[in-house]
């Protein structure tokens, strides 16, 4: 969340042909694991809206048909190295960014 939005915006703006894997574990590890927009709790521990990453990346310009939200425990692409290469390869063949999100 902290470091990826600017990079993704730059990729979209410059018409990059990449596949981004966004793995959401609902934690902020680089600054101490406090509550954040990804886990649905504000800094005081109160319930707050949780960011919808698919909507967020769409707002940055990734086309909706290029956004694929998957459950990493159910997606063969996420669990077997050989399947990752074959299954995710086609996402980057459209001369525009693609995003596969799981959490």
Image (tube, grey):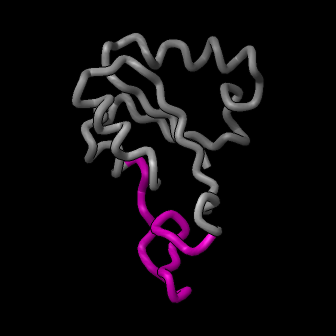
Residue 89 located left or right of residue 2: right
Residue 84 located left or right of residue 16: right
Q: Residue 28 placed where, x, y %?
A: 59, 62
Q: Which residues are magenta?
A: 33-54
Q: Is residue 82 above or below residue 13?
A: above
95 vs 34, nearest the viewer: 34
Q: Is residue 51 above or below residue 88?
A: below
Residue in the image at 51% along x and 34% along y: 100
Residue 18 located left or right of residue 96: right
Residue 29 magenta-highlighted: no
Q: Is residue 7 above or below residue 80?
A: below
20 vs 69, nearest the viewer: 20
Q: Residue 6 placed where, x, y %?
A: 34, 43
Magenta span: helix, strand or loop, mainly?
loop
Q: Is residue 85 above or below residue 67?
A: above
What count of labels does the image hold?
0
- Residue 26 visible to an observer of this rendering: no
Q: Residue 33 placed where, x, y %?
A: 64, 68
Residue in the image at 64% along x and 14% along y: 85
Q: Residue 67 placed where, x, y %?
A: 41, 35
- Residue 19 visible to an observer of this rendering: yes
Residue in the image at 44% along x and 79% along y: 48
**Which quadrant of the view contains residue 17?**
top left
Residue in the image at 32% along x and 29% along y: 11
């Amino acid at each position: 969340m902290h470091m990826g939005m600017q990079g993704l915006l730059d990729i979209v703006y410059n018409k990059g042909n990449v596949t981004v894997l966004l793995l959401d574990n609902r934690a902020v590890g680089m600054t101490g694991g406090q509550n954040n927009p990804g886990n649905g709790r504000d800094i005081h521990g109160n319930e707050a809206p949780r960011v919808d990453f698919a909507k967020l990346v769409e707002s940055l310009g990734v086309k909706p048909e290029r956004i694929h939200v998957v459950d990493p425990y159910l997606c063969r692409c996420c669990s077997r190295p050989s399947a990752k290469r074959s299954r995710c390869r086609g996402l980057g063949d459209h001369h525009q960014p693609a995003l596969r999100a799981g959490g």
